[in-house]
Image (tube, rainbow, N blue to C red):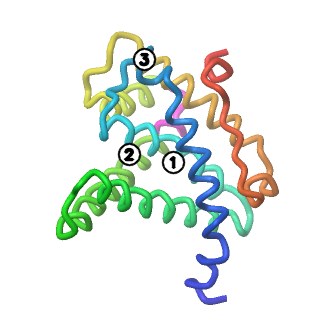
Amino acid sequence: MLPFLRRRRFERTGFELYCAAVAAARAPIFYADLGVPDTLDGRFDLVGLHVFLLIRRLGALPPPGADLAQAVFDAMFSDMDVNLREIGVGDMSVGKKVKMMWEAFHGRSAAYQAALANADHADLEAALARNVWRGAAPAGQAAILARMTRAQDAALAGQPLAVFAAGQAQFLAPAEALA
């Protein structure tokens, strides 16, 4: 199948999965209790973290896992384009800003991937502090977010392809991720 047609085939499912990641990233605990900045950047970082975890899981699955992962990525950056336009970013600079977000997402994803491959929690804490709080995480909060991230990663790893192919991703509630 042509790559363009394959992408279209999973477009709706990718958007549904992306929406699940966004919903998980909007949990008030991140902003009220962990001190993640409730700004465009702070929200982008939490959405990016949850999308990364979802794409990581999808990429580890047999076909059509990689196609679903690409569809989630496409949905994220289509949404970023729309959001930038809605907040008044001029048409001429939207593409440049989306490209910067795309590069930031890939950099963060590489850092999180390497940190999750390492059993040492310090690497993940450092990557989260550097990206989510721009290096100035409130005391202990990066460790809490790292624990929640590992729990979400494990929860997604336990979900079969059929769940994702149906457009569902079951992220843990923050209380469950902290348990």
Label pair 1/3, CB-CB below 8 angstroms: no
Tell me: residue 52, above or below residue 175.
Answer: below
Which residue corresponds to the image point at 30% horizontal and 31% vertical from the top-left?
130
As measured in the structure, the alpha-carbon distance from the residue carrying label 1 to the one carrying label 2 is: 9 Å
Task: Give coordinates of residue 28: x percent, y percent.
Answer: 49, 23
Q: Name the kind of residue labelled 2 in the image.
A: Arg
Q: Is 15 left, or right, of 126 in this rendering?
A: right
Dot 2: few (<14), some (14–19), or many (≥20) neighbours within 10 Å? many
Which residue corresponds to the image point at 38% horizontal and 51% vertical from the top-left?
105
Which residue lies most toward the top here? 139
Q: Secondary structure at mark 3?
A: helix
Residue wearing tag 3: 32
Residue 108 is marked as 2
Q: Report the span colored magenta.
A: 115-120
Label pair 1/2, CB-CB below 8 angstroms: yes
Nearer the observer: mark 1 or 3; the answer is 3
Residue wearing tag 1: 52
